[in-house]
Image (tube, grey):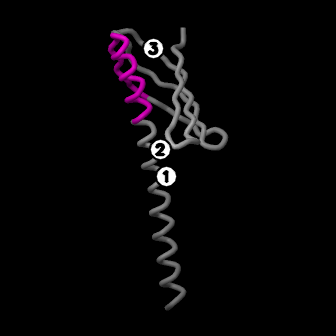
Amino acid sequence: MKKALVSLVLACSALVMLSGCVVSEEKLNDKVTQGIVEYEQQEGNHLEVTDLKLEKGEGKNYKGVLTGKLNGEDVVYDVTVDDSGSDFEVDWELRK
C-alpha cells in the first residue's frame, strides 16, 4: 500500500512538472510574439502574426520562424531567443 501511494505521489509530481514546462513555453511564445508586434507598432507598422514556431536549441536558446502579415504583405521573420538570464533576449530578422 505504501509503495502504491508513493508511486501515485511521484506520478502526480511528474505531471505537474511537465505541465509547468508546457505553460512556460507557451508563455515564451506569447511574450516573443507580443514583443515583436509592439516593436513594429512603435515603428508605425501593423503586424498580424499567424504563427510562431520555436525549437529548443542548446541550453535555454530557441530558434524559430514567425509568419504573418506586415502592413498587409506576407512576411517571415527568423527569430532567436536566449532565455538564460533573468529575462529573455529576442532577436529577429525579416527575410527578404
53 or 47: which is nearer to us? 47
Circle number at residue 68: none
Q: Is 76 rendered above or below residue 13?
A: above
Q: Are marks 3 and 1 in contact (CB under 8 Å)?
A: no
Q: Is residue 83 magenta?
A: no
Say what amino acid the circle numbered 3 marks. Answer: Val
Q: Earlier in the sequence, mark 3 or mark 1?
A: 1
Label 2 SS: helix
The verdict on residue 32 being magenta is yes
Residue at figure coordinates x 42%, y 24% from the top left? 36
> Residue flagged by tag 1: what amino acid is it?
Cys
- Tag 3 residue: 75
Secondary structure of the residue carrying tag 3 is strand
Q: Which residue is mark 1?
A: 21
**Where is 22 relative to 78, above or below?**
below
Q: Are marks 2 and 3 in contact (CB under 8 Å)?
A: no
Q: Marks 2 and 3, how far apart in space?
A: 23 Å
